[in-house]
Amino acid sequence: MNEYPDTKVTVVVDATFGHRIDKREVAEFNDAIDNNELVSPPAGAVGRGDGFVLTIAKKIGATVVSNDSYQEFHQDHPWLFDGGRLMGGKPVPLVGWVFIDRLPVRPSAAKSVKKASREANRPMPIPRTPPPNIKLAAKTKVTATSAVNASASAQAPSARTKPTTAVNELAPFLEFVEKYKLGSKVKGVVETYSAHGVYVRIGDVLGYLPLRLMANPAPRSAREFVKIGQQVSLVVSSFTASRRSIDVGIVGPVTAVKKTVPVKKSKKRPASAQTRPASAQTRPASAPIRKAPAKKK
């Protein structure tokens, strides 16, 4: 906008963009959507964000600012190869963003795409690395030792770096996020127990039900509250894009698992203690035997 002040800029983001940003930026994102500063494609749009961008540019003859070549859409949008219809940009250290006209890369004859593939209709992938930070330009002094260590670490991954284990696959997770917003009600089946809750199966994804969202007050153990295979009514509580996890809470009453109290067996008395002789039942054993007084003659 600074380099082209007389040009109207329309920013288009994927439909799942709002669920893949930091929670602290969600309010700002929603305000930008309400103020028409950001535009997202309608649900179920063919080609999703890419197709929506090209449709807008074709309708008004606009220039697309993107580093994508849109190879899946070359047949439907041949105007991409016209001069001035596609522009790319890159951040340059100590300079800032630099924009330049570009032409999309044509696929070879052997690999030509006749129609849009399935990948073109899927949501945008979650970025694994953060965007370039302009503050990094100030750190220009690097010692030779640190440079050697940096090159060595780039070739061999560090042993301290532990990969983040994703709970769900990318495609099912993004489809769930796009279909169910926060607060949506779903149904799930308890699948496995964990240290502080349970995992529930909701269609093609796994949701995590922590103890704090089971009841108020929270139960001491998940095994005391739900059992494997039990169907429960849930509400979507939060998403964690880095782990592709979905936190859910229980809605409505739930029949808790009843504890089975073991019955204590009474100790049997020996047979000698149960059956006593008749003489012992009529008088105490320690009572002395009194004799009748003798009659005087």
Image (cartoon, rainbow, N blue to C red):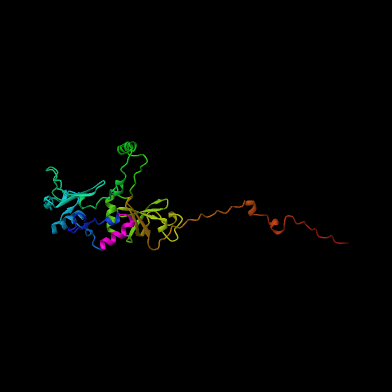
Residue 28 place in picture, x, y as percent = 30, 59
Q: Quadrant of the N terminus?
A: bottom left
Residue drawn at x 26%, y 61% as measured from the top left: 33
Residue 236 place in picture, x, y as percent = 34, 59
Q: Nearer the viewer, residue 175 or 273?
A: 175
> Which residues fall within the magenta stretch?
21-34
Q: Is residue 106 magenta?
A: no
Give the quadrant of residue 142: top left
Q: Is residue 31 left or right of residue 79?
A: right
Residue 160 place in picture, x, y as percent = 37, 41
Q: Nearer the viewer, residue 85 or 277?
A: 85
* Residue 50 in sight from this viewpoint: yes
Residue drawn at x 40%, y 51% as measured from the top left: 193
Q: Nearer the viewer, residue 292 or 29?
A: 29
Residue drawn at x 27%, y 58% as measured from the top left: 179
Q: Is residue 109 left or right of residue 137?
A: left
- Main SS, magenta residues: helix
Q: Is residue 263 above or below residue 92?
A: below
Q: Quadrant of the C terminus?
A: bottom right
